[in-house]
Amino acid sequence: MFCMKRTLAWQRARHGKGPILDVRKPDIDNLAKSLLDGMVASGVITDDSQVFDLRALKLMHEVGGRPHAWVAMEWRDAIR
């Protein structure tokens, strides 16, 4: 889940205080690719071909929140 910065206009508008679906740029596939590349570079995984299930959600963070990414991983033995 990617929580992007809420714009000042969205903060001023009365759209609620919780997270809002974000359809602005950057594209979610580019965010996911960057995250996977960072995981390879840091040694968390050896190759992004090891990932067989990927689910992504892009939101504007809640009022007063900070932009961040939340990742959950589960390790499975692969059949080769």
Image (spheres, rainbow, N blue to C red):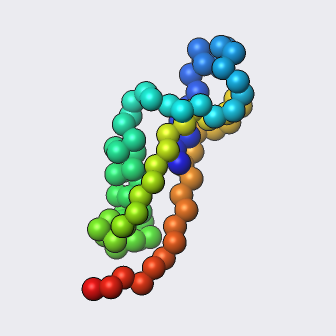
- Looking at the image, which is closer to me, 50 or 64? 50
* Quadrant in the picture for residue 66: top right
Q: Could one spot residue 38 in this view of the protein?
A: no
Residue at figure coordinates x 33%, y 85% from the top left = 79
Give the answer, above or below, for where 5 lies relative to 71.
above
Give the answer, above or below, for where 76 lies relative to 32.
below
Q: Indicate the position of residue 7 as horizontal and vertical percent values.
A: 56, 22
Residue at figure coordinates x 42%, y 84% from the top left = 77
Residue at figure coordinates x 49%, y 44% from the top left = 57
Q: Indicate the position of residue 65 as horizontal and vertical percent values.
A: 68, 36
- Give the left or right position of residue 26, taking residue 72 as reference: left
Q: Indicate the position of residue 69 as horizontal and vertical percent values.
A: 54, 49
Q: Classify the position of the C terminus by image quarter.
A: bottom left
* Quadrant in the picture for residue 17: top right
Give the answer, above or below, for where 10 lies relative to 42.
above
Give the answer, above or below, for where 47 lies relative to 56.
below
Q: Indicate the position of residue 55 as horizontal and vertical percent values.
A: 45, 54
Q: Could one spot residue 30 in this view of the protein?
A: yes
- Looking at the image, which is closer to me, 15 or 47? 15
